[in-house]
Image: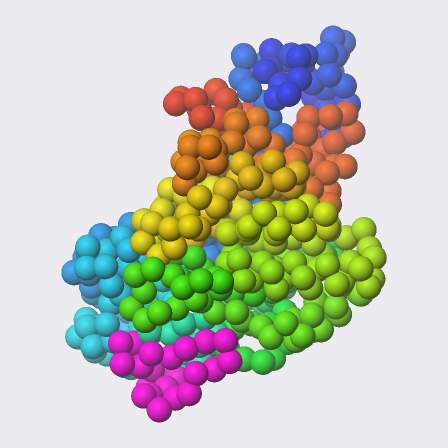
């Protein structure tokens, strides 16, 4: 029933012991007897990490069935990787790969349709860029999807048949021709993704784009008691590739699964120059200011329905043009229909001072990714207008504006999913040195920030009496060169 941890360095506290009773933190500095006593031998005990935006199932997919192209440095290497994978597939079977990034390729360009035809003459293939907003395909893939040079662009997307690229919602056109993953496929991927996050010290994570079959997989796993960490989902309302809108989900609450939020994509990504800016990007093949995915009134109507039904809204919004649109809608919702529900903005890449102030005044939680500053920096340097670089993922400005910041990895957009590395980038790798934040701020954003983003800070995110005993044990504090995850513990696992 009770476990006493002694000889611990407790994050944010001066005591050296903590008593856990029935999975809850019961007392600090306890000196009596417990059912079980564990000597931590000076290890650091922190609240479990919370990755507030990570595509859990895709992380699992890349660890099981999808070909991983992240980190590949040249097109010939990329073609070799495809050929090797093709050896394991039947003729005609789809090959799905993910993770290329033209800015990291020596050739500084995506693979072409005709090149992919040579590499894969008998298999349809789809290669998703690391951002998941741009995709390269071969001719067989286009044929099976019924796409040719005369196919018009779908709303919110573009088909570039000649070079073989699909942008934004155009993905949906090709996905229709691909075999649909089953709920069992999703379950396998979710488990693989959760296992990996748990190894990184995560006790809670948010999957930021969940459709109905994926949601079913999460519910199945939660009800069978199989989820290795807690999961919060942002349920997607408008999938790529069409005008269909999924109905609002049933709210669902379980100690390991929270379904009370919906997700919208309002623009593209910064690394591929598709986030919507007020000025043109640099170095794009054609002049571009990115793509707004929604007409403002349509987005307002969709959000209003969720807002009135009591759902939290999380919106992918990166460019300044998008932040103006989305914060404007949030402001209307809060003014017309006041509520205690805190809406979120995912990424929040390029806010100007007015966006920062408005987000703060509305109580909006922001969910940026410090690790982008390392892995996608070459893209930011290449595509961002000079005047925007200093404010790109500027965590210092966000905290100084009084915003609640929940840090996250957005894996597998980046290869580096380790939270300890995310903390280091937040502390040391801002676009300018003055954008960096402190160790305490970074840890807070990866613990309490995540709990606040889910409106569950009464249960998670700090070491306080009454909160769940979800812990991560570390050999040294994060950012120390020898810092290692020793153990991840969830409240339910304390012996009873
Ligand atoms: Zn994402």
Name the spot of residue 224 as percent of width and height, x first.
65, 53
Above or below residue 360? Residue 466 is above
Q: Quadrant of residue 137?
A: bottom left
- Left or right, 38 with respect to 268, comes to right
- Left or right, 249 with respect to 162, comes to right
Can residue 466 be found in the magenta stretch? no
- Left or right, 13 with respect to 435, comes to right
Q: Residue furthest bottom?
A: 150
Residue 292 shows up from this direction: yes
Can residue 161 be found in the magenta stretch? yes
Name the dominant secondary structure of the magenta segment. Answer: loop
For the C terminus, give its image quadrant: top right
Q: Which residues are magenta?
A: 141-164
At 59% from the left and 15% from the top, the residue drawn is 9
At 74% from the left and 12% from the top, the residue drawn is 30
Q: Quadrant of residue 467?
A: top right
Residue 65 shows up from this direction: no
For the N terminus, give its image quadrant: top right
> Which residue occupies the foreground of this view, 274 or 151?
274
Above or below residue 131? Residue 146 is below
Above or below residue 412? Residue 98 is below
> Which residue occupies the foreground of this view, 280 or 130?
280
Name the spot of residue 206 as percent of width and height, x first.
59, 50
Above or below residue 402? Residue 178 is below
At 47% from the left and 82% from the top, the residue drawn is 154
How many marks do you count on the picture? Answer: 0
Name the spot of residue 136 as percent of width and height, x first.
32, 70
Name the spot of residue 42 as percent of width and height, x first.
54, 12
């Amino acid at each position: 029933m009770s476990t006493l941890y002694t000889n611990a360095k407790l994050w944010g506290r001066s005591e050296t012991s903590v008593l856990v009773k029935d999975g809850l933190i019961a007392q600090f500095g306890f000196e009596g007897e417990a059912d079980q006593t564990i000597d931590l031998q000076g290890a650091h005990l922190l609240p479990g990490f919370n990755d507030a935006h990570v595509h859990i199932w895709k992380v699992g997919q890349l660890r099981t069935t999808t070909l991983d192209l992240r980190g590949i440095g040249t097109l010939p290497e990329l073609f070799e990787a495809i050929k090797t994978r093709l050896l394991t597939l039947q003729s005609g079977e789809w090959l799905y790969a993910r993770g290329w990034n033209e800015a990291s390729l020596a050739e500084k360009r995506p693979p072409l349709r005709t090149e992919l035809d040579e590499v894969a003459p008998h298999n349809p293939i789809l290669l998703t860029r690391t951002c998941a907003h741009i995709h390269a395909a071969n001719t067989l893939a286009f044929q099976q999807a019924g796409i040719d040079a005369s196919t018009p662009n779908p709303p919110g997307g573009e088909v570039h048949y000649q070079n073989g690229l699909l942008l934004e919602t155009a993905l949906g056109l090709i996905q229709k021709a691909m075999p649909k993953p089953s709920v069992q496929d999703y379950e396998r991927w979710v488990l693989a993704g959760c296992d990996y996050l748990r190894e990184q010290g995560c006790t809670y994570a948010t999957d930021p784009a969940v459709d109905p079959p994926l949601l079913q997989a999460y519910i199945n796993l939660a009800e069978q008691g199989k989820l290795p960490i807690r999961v919060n989902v942002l349920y997607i309302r408008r999938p790529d590739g069409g005008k269909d809108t999924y109905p609002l989900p049933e709210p669902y609450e379980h100690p390991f699964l929270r379904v009370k939020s919906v997700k919208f994509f309002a623009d593209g990504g910064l690394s591929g120059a598709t986030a919507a800016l007020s000025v043109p990007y640099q170095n794009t093949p054609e002049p571009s200011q990115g793509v707004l995915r929604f007409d403002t009134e349509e987005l307002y109507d969709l959000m209003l329905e969720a807002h009135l039904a009591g759902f939290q809204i999380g919106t992918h919004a990166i460019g300044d043009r998008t932040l103006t649109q989305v914060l404007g809608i949030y402001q209307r919702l809060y003014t017309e229909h006041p509520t205690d529900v805190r809406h979120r903005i995912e990424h929040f890449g390029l806010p100007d001072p007015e966006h920062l102030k408005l987000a703060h005044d509305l109580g909006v939680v922001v969910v940026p990714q410090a690790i982008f500053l390392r892995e996608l920096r070459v893209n930011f340097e290449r595509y961002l207008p000079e005047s925007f670089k200093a404010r790109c993922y500027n965590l210092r400005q966000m905290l100084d504006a009084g915003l609640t910041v929940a840090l996250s990895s957005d894996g597998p957009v980046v290869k580096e999913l380790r939270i300890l590395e995310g903390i280091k980038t937040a502390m040391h790798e801002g676009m300018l040195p003055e954008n960096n934040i402190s160790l305490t701020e970074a840890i807070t954003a990866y613990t309490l920030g995540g709990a606040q983003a889910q409106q569950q800070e009464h249960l998670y995110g700090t070491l306080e009496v009454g909160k769940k005993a979800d812990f991560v044990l570390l050999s040294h504090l994060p950012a120390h060169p020898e810092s290692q995850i020793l153990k991840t513990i969830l409240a339910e696992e304390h012996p009873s």
